[in-house]
Amino acid sequence: MIPSGTTPRDAAAGELKFRDPVRGAALTAALAKTVAGIGRSPVSVMHVCGSHEQAIARFGLRTAFPRDLRVIMGPGCPVCITDQPEVDEAVALARQGVRIATYGDMVRVPGTAASLADAQAEGARVDVVYSIDQAIALAAASSEPLVFFATGFETTAVATAAAILAGLPSNFFVLSAHKYIPPAMEIVAEMPDSRIEGFVAAGHAATITGWGVFEAFVARHGVPVVVAGFEPLDILAALVRLVELIRDGVRTVENMFPRCVTREGNLVAQRQLWDVFTPIGGRWRGIAHVPNGNLRLLDRWSHLDARRRFAIDLTRLWDEAPSLLSQQCRCGDIMSGLRTPADCALFGAECLPETPVGACMVSSEGTCRIWHEYGVPR
Amino acid sequence: MITLANDRVARVTMPHGAGGRAMRRLIEQVFLRDAPPAAAAMDDGAVIPLAGGGSLIVTTDAHVIQPLVFPGGDIGRLAVSGTVNDLAMMGATEPLGLACSVVIEEGFAVDDLERLQRSMAEACAEAGTSVVTGDTKVMRRGELDGVVITTTGVGITWRPVRDSGAAAGDVLVVTGTIGDHGVAVMAARHQFQFGEELRSDVAPLNGLVRAALAAGDVHAMKDPTRGGVASALHEIAAKSRVGIVIREHAVPVRPGVRAAADLLGIDPLFIANEGKAVLAVRPHAAEAVLAALHAHPYGRDAAIVGECVSGQPGTVTVDTGFGLRRLSEPDGELLPRIC
């Protein structure tokens, strides 16, 4: 999506401010000093956002992190945690002849036996869109039914909600695989093996939920949370602050992205979100059953709900054997912070971006894809 | 069905045409089986030695693009420039002539066809060549999308420049801002607005390359089309058996292209160009080549972006100013990320 009000000129000026290597070096030195001041190793923190991992890898920040700091990527890739049965529903609909529109990353995510790209190669109609508005335009230009396979966290769920509230063409239906991130942090914090001492929260999701949403989490789990933006200096500054809070034993939420995030968040967007969706429990691929982690359409929108309007026949997919390799996929452990891609035998060998075994290798937000793209940190 | 990395490709998918690893694998599996060594080098063109000395360079390229007309150019200018540039990248900067096949969809407006022809003629005039033979076919409506133009070019060079010619110590030069073409086409295709108008850089580069070759020793040369600068650097690194290190801040990128790429979650190094070249230059000649590029209208923003090293042959490393990262080999279509 192209946010309105951000002109390229603004973005270019912002880049100069937040991508200054000199300031980066100063923050890197401060980070090393603060971590050393704690006097034990490792200090483990987790971020829960693919965009953070993207920025960390894209700018080579891991090569600049102190050795004693472990920065783990949690379940922050909406594509990766979309469960196979959800992909199967979209694939089944596509094979039944229903036109599907979805975000680019979803096309190649393997379901139990096939991806939307496989269905497309067999003749199904699958359109890649950059926003729900484009999908609506496709539907408006024709009379046949179009199902929007809606994926992503709060950020894209709000866009789906706003479009639904604004009114849709009568041939437009929604297959929601939207996810809600706050409950997932609870799951990871409660994992017995996780040993996470602090969280970096995703700045863009927090623009919608507000940073206040993390206060109850901090109270329950006794670990600090720092909300961070996505430029390299944002991330370094947030890590310095998070490690300071760990060092001082302060359990609080700190907002290090105040140019976008407020305590209460975007109230209009929150109202739209809950006017359209209801949170239900469901599996996040490879991780666990996440209570309230999935967003489904409320009953009043059942006339738009592809799950209620179409008979989605999954049985034919069950005749196809799932890939044997997929059983060796370590995506779940990687997204829980228990392993890294380097621990996976398939990574970089059988599992490559053009032949992904797990969803983490498909999405540009996936840990495996990012590590493959930017190199395994030494 | 998920295919395994070492399996045969069973069915062609879009990434097989995207200029990266997937395409190379398909070509190796299907087309290179019984190919002579000239084709197996997978350079921009074939080098055929002539009895009287010198080499004939032959190259061909099928051009498909949507939309057919985009800011800064159209499929006609692209079809001429693409082939002229492939010849130039091999060192053949005086194209002897082009062959041109046009496949047209039933119902295509002749006015539009004339416009494409005019822009082909303009590009030919600029490159100092002409279309000397051609073929025209029409297919039924819906059997192709608008028009497909295939051009074949021939040229002669006394010293072919190959992808395998770079050596450790060579300086890497990019002849101007990168990503302009890909972003302009993406913006036109999906009707994005990025504030400033982004224009394709599509242009015949033989004049620019002639100036660079006259100024100093160029060891390897690629036009970073599909797969972008990343793909060009990987080919040079792999075929020349050198490591490559580039400094990200030195790579020229227009602010509008940078902003668009950031918003779409795409690295400008992966975005296609149609009027740029990447050169590996002998270190002592770097300043002279750079000056020659700067003096040409298509090379005004040329910059030294990195160098070839002896360590880690076949790899490309990016110094971001914050740290180091590996630059991966492009592997498929550019798909924008979700959030």
Image: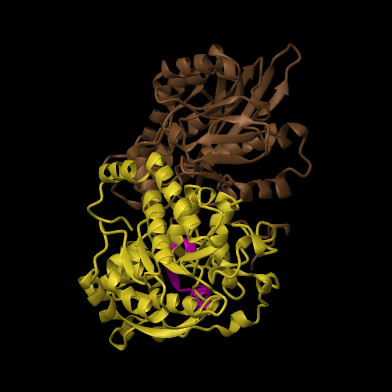
Chain colours: A yellow, B brown
Dominant SS of magenta comes to: helix
Quarter the N terminus of chain B occupies: bottom right
The residue located at (55%, 69%) in the rendering is A337
Direction bottom: furthest residue:
A299
Q: Position of residue A155 (x, y in %)?
A: 34, 67
Q: Position of residue B25 (x, y in %)?
A: 68, 49
Residue A116 as seen in the image, left or right of residue B184: right
Quarter of the image where one finds residue A151: bottom left
Asked if the stretch drawn in magenta spans residue A346, the answer is no
Viewer-side residue, B118 vs B186 = B186
Q: Say if residue B133 shows up in the picture.
A: no
Q: Please report the bounds of the magenta region as a residue range.
A: A86-105
The residue located at (39%, 22%) in the rendering is B300
The residue located at (25%, 56%) in the rendering is A259
B50, above or below A33, in the image: above
Residue B179 as seen in the image, left or right of residue A256: right
Q: Position of residue A265 (x, y in %)?
A: 24, 69
Viewer-side residue, B267 vs B181 = B267
Q: How many marks?
A: 0
Q: Say if residue A325 shows up in the picture.
A: yes
Asked if the stretch drawn in magenta spans residue A101, the answer is yes
The residue located at (66%, 78%) in the rendering is A320
Quarter the C terminus of chain B occupies: bottom left
Q: Position of residue B173 (x, y in %)?
A: 51, 26
Quarter of the image where one finds residue B162: top right
